[in-house]
């Protein structure tokens, strides 16, 4: 039997989970579990690059674990990054196989360092913001992953991970690391209901994101007040209407999608009707998530136990990599 290929992806612990996160990434993670050996990390070390609150970090980390499990991620595949300290250890080693220049050219660094500079009083920019992609490379390579499902915004970081792997291999004279590849999957770009020209995200305010755990009535209300037409008619479908159709498609309601699209083309579509159908579709998608979440929240102890067990198992693979890497790199292992 052929061995399953390895998939790895990670997500930062930030607040709630909305339909943009779900349709854009998490749903895909869930599907990949059928085909691949999957490792999914909640990356708390990554969440320290900007000023943060330690208590909040810990509670966000567990919340995200519960949210991922509620949305269908198998807890056996889930780990918390700081429970696998080999990520940080490999990251140091990789610091020595990555050029300073390449780090400064990362677009995410350029964006975030200017943000950080403006938002903190003393203009503090953590060095971790610069070296963050090295930790990301360690996240991937510590499991010797074949595929990394990410959005286009992470392509540059993946390229850097490959460069690090290659430089390490060259210097050690051994093709030790496989070069990881991006796994792009066609996922819908979900826009804000309140401003359909921007991505769904809570950072711009509550009304710009719809939680997958929201009460059905809240979902209905948010869809009901979604922006449709902005007044000007260019002949093309407006971003708001397009977003509603795209949500319907993402919810896999193709019959309604097709018939409402017919109406749209004939010019007889009522937006109120479209909204009703979309709201019910989202409620239906999210029903099992709400149920599952309520159960998990009531059994937090059990959740923590499961994730600690999974992290220990997953750590085994990371430790194996570190032993081999240290051996190759001329470092010492206490236990051989
Ligand atoms: N940098 C990613 C983001 O901002 C998160 C991330 C950290 C990641 N480590 C990773 C993604 C490893 C894929 C693989 O979204």
Image: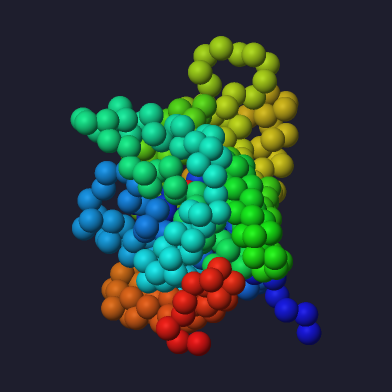
Residue 48 visible in rendering: yes
Above or below for 182 versus 192: below
In the displayed orientation, state which residue is furthest to the right.
1
Residue 146 visible in rendering: no
Residue 29 position by quadrant: bottom right
Q: Residue 122, percent across and down?
A: 22, 31
Left or right: 82 with respect to 87?
left
Query: Could you tell me which residue is drawn at 67 percent across and 20 percent down?
Result: 236
- Residue 180 versus residue 271: which sits nearer the camera? 180
- Residue 1 versus residue 86: which sits nearer the camera? 86
Above or below for 236 versus 219: above
Residue 3 position by quadrant: bottom right
In the displayed orientation, state which residue is furthest to the front.
330
Instruction: Say how the picture is coloured.
Output: rainbow
Query: Could you tell me which residue is drawn at 33 percent across and 65 percent down?
Result: 62
Query: Could you tell me which residue is drawn at 55 percent across and 49 percent down?
Result: 98
Left or right: 226 with respect to 29?
left
Left or right: 256 with respect to 190?
right
Q: Residue 273, percent across and down?
A: 55, 36
- Residue 272 versus residue 185: which sits nearer the camera? 185
Q: Residue 330, percent across and down?
A: 53, 71
In the displayed orientation, state which residue is furthest to the bottom.
336
Q: Residue 118, percent across and down?
A: 30, 27
Tally of numbered discs: 0
Query: Could you tell me which residue is drawn at 45 percent across and 87 percent down?
Result: 335
Q: Quadrant of the N terminus?
A: bottom right
């Amino acid at each position: 039997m052929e061995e399953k290929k390895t998939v790895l992806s990670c997500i930062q612990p930030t607040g709630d989970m909305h339909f943009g996160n779900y349709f854009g990434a998490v749903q895909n993670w869930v599907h990949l579990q059928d085909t691949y050996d999957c490792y999914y990390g909640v990356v708390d070390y990554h969440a320290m690059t900007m000023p943060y609150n330690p208590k909040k970090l810990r509670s966000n980390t567990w919340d995200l674990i519960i949210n991922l499990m509620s949305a269908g991620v198998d807890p056996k595949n889930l780990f918390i990054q700081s429970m696998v300290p080999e990520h940080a250890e490999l990251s140091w080693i990789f610091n020595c196989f990555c050029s300073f220049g390449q780090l400064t050219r990362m677009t995410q660094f350029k964006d975030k360092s200017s943000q950080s500079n403006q938002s903190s009083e003393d203009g503090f920019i953590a060095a971790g913001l610069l070296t963050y992609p090295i930790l990301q490379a360690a996240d991937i390579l510590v499991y010797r992953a074949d595929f990394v499902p990410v959005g286009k915004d992470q392509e540059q970081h993946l390229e850097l991970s490959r460069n690090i792997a290659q430089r390490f291999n060259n210097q050690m004279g051994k093709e030790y690391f496989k070069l990881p590849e991006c796994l792009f999957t066609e996922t819908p770009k979900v826009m804000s209901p309140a401003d359909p020209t921007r991505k769904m995200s809570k950072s711009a305010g509550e009304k710009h994101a719809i939680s997958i755990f929201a009460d059905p009535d809240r979902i209905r209300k948010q869809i009901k007040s979604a922006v449709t037409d902005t007044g000007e008619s260019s002949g093309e479908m407006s971003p708001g209407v397009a977003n509603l159709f795209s949500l319907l498609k993402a919810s896999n309601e193709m019959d309604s999608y097709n018939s409402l699209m017919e109406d749209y083309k004939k010019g007889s579509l009522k937006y109120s009707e479209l909204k009703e159908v979309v709201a019910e579709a989202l409620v239906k998608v999210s029903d099992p998530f709400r149920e599952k979440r309520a159960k998990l929240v009531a059994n937090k102890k059990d959740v923590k136990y499961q994730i600690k067990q999974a992290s220990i198992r997953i750590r085994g693979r990371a430790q194996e990599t570190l032993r081999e890497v240290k051996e190759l790199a001329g470092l010492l292992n206490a236990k051989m």
